[in-house]
Amino acid sequence: MSVYVGKYHSDFEREVFRAEFEDNKTPLDIRHDLATHSDEFNWGYGGSGPAQLALALLADVVGDEKAQLFYQDFKFQVVANWKGDSGWHITDAAIREKVREIEVNRILVEARRLKRESKQLSELLQSNLNVAQWPSIEKRLGVLLEKFDESIDRKVTLFLNGS
């Protein structure tokens, strides 16, 4: 298990490192290869220094691809809430858990959006089709939308259960 530690020395001096054992401290790579928001790490607000810190933490724990997808959410939900004039620590397990929570929330938001759009599509079709044609089309569309909703629900459930 790794613990990430941020030490506040002054407004102009902060230190961030990964500690795997009590004696083993490794400075956290700022990861300008992924994005350059700031030349230094910071925390306690939602700006560029916290963005760089969130990106570096996530890249170190969950990899570059997931880091780039989720670091802004992580910045606002975690890094911005650490007190700016004091230190902090977080485990790699806590980072993974938060990233998973962010990922699940995004999936749920997308699933709700798709369900809303399927309902809107149904209403749009109903309003634009010949009334005589509607019953048979509505039945087929209803079956398709029901299967679509079940598929989304199944995929979200599988994801939430870690499958």
Image: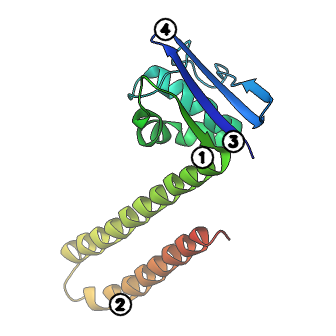
> Could you say where residue 97 lies in the image, as x and y percent from the top left?
58, 54
Using the image, determine if residue 70 lies above or below residue 44.
below
Q: Amino acid at mark 4?
A: Phe
User: In this view of the protein, which residue sits in the foreground, 142 or 21?
Assistant: 21
Question: Is there a contact, CB below 8 Å, between mark 1 and mark 3?
Answer: yes
Q: How crowded is the residue under tag 1: few (<14 C-alpha within 10 Å), some, or many (20+)?
A: many
Question: As drawn, which residue projects farthest toward the front?
Answer: 22
Identify the mark nearer the N-term, 1 or 4.
4
Image quadrant occupied by the C terminus: bottom right
Question: Is there a contact, CB below 8 Å, between mark 2 and mark 3?
Answer: no
Quick one: SS at disc 3?
Answer: helix
Quick one: SS at disc 1?
Answer: helix
Q: How crowded is the residue under tag 2: few (<14 C-alpha within 10 Å), some, or many (20+)?
A: few
Q: Which residue is mark 1?
A: 95
Q: Which residue is mark 2?
A: 139
Identify the mark nearer the N-term, 2 or 1.
1
Identify the mark nearer the N-term, 1 or 3.
3
- Asked where in the image residue 105 lies, by quadrant, the reply is bottom left
Quick one: SS at disc 2?
Answer: helix
Q: Amino acid at mark 3?
A: Val
Question: What residue appears at the point 44 percent right and 34 percent down from the top-left corner?
Answer: 82
Q: Which residue is mark 3?
A: 61
Q: Which residue is mark 4?
A: 12
User: In this view of the protein, which residue sits in the foreground, 69 or 18?
Assistant: 18
* Alpha carbons under labels 1 and 4: distance apart: 26 Å
User: In this view of the protein, which residue sits in the foreground, 99 or 14?
Assistant: 14
